[in-house]
Amino acid sequence: MNRKVTFTAMDHGTREDYDLVEAHDERNAAELADRVLGWLRSMDGDSPYRISRLQHALQTATRAERDGADDETIACALLHDIGDVISPRNHSAASAALLAPYVSEKNHWIVKHHGLFQGYYWMHHYGEDRNVRDRYRDHEHYQACVEFCARWDQVSFDPAYKSHSLEHYEPLVRELFAREPRPFL
């Protein structure tokens, strides 16, 4: 990129400067699906689980698909742990932030909270309250998140489970990130 903005502080920018920034952002956004698919491929490495993190994502998506979930929900099942690539300690929030402009409020909420809800299956081993998710019991998406975790996420660490390939889900990922993004949340 040869052209640069004229400002060194944003409050000195002109419309032409911000048109240049927007054009750059558009090109960057057009490559988002490729980056996300690359991040998924990077999760196909060593793991303390009996399968890779990519295989976990594929199993989760495959289970959702076989259960009859809609395409957006299947894509969220595939990408629910994508935040592990950049923020392992806060992966649910990172995954949700990536997906927020492209998915429904319900799916965003499920992805954002799935890590806490998954705690039901392991927190008691550390003397913590496994029912901490119940602080959201009155939320309209509470039960959907419980079911996401129970039916698709927590059971998807099985080396014998036959999942669809990443190539099977690539069109879904491309369609998701080709959507017109919602404005800032």
Image (cartoon, rainbow, N blue to C red):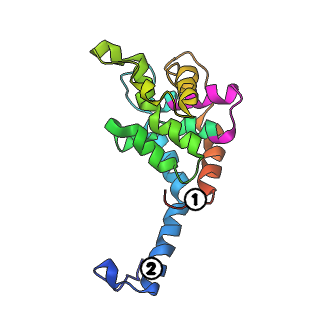
Could you say which quadrant of the image residue 66 lies in?
top right
What crowding class fits label 2: few (fewer than 14 Cα within 10 Å), some (14-19), or many (20 or more)? some
Could you say which quadrant of the image residue 132 lies in?
top left
Horizontal side, residue 87 vs residue 171: left or right = left
- In the image, 170 versus 184, the foreground residue is 184
Measuring from the top left, give residue 95's x and y in whole percent. 45, 43
* Residue at x 42%, y 19% (from the top left corner): 120
Specify the amino acid type for callout 1.
Answer: Pro
Kindly state the secondary structure of the residue where label 1 is placed.
loop
As drawn, 155 above or below 137: above
Measuring from the top left, give residue 38's x and y in whole percent. 48, 47
Inter-mark Cα distance, 1 to 2: 19 Å
Q: Which residue is mark 2?
A: 18
Q: Quadrant of the N terminus?
A: bottom left
Query: Would you say residue 173 is visible in this rendering?
Result: yes
Whether residue 63 is in magenta: the answer is yes
Measuring from the top left, give residue 135's x and y in whole percent. 42, 28
Could you say which quadrant of the image residue 65 lies in?
top right
Kindly state the secondary structure of the residue where label 2 is placed.
helix
Query: Would you say residue 167 is visible in this rendering?
Result: no
Q: Looking at the rendered structure, which numbered label has been put on residue 1?
A: none
Q: Which residue is mark 1?
A: 181
Specify the amino acid type for callout 2.
Answer: Tyr
- In the image, 108 versus 56, the foreground residue is 108
As drawn, 96 above or below 184: above
* Residue at x 57%, y 58% (from the top left corner): 182
Measuring from the top left, give residue 54's x and y in whole percent. 48, 33
* Sooner in the amino-acid sequence: mark 1 or mark 2: 2
Q: Which residues are magenta?
A: 57-72
Whether residue 64 is in magenta: the answer is yes
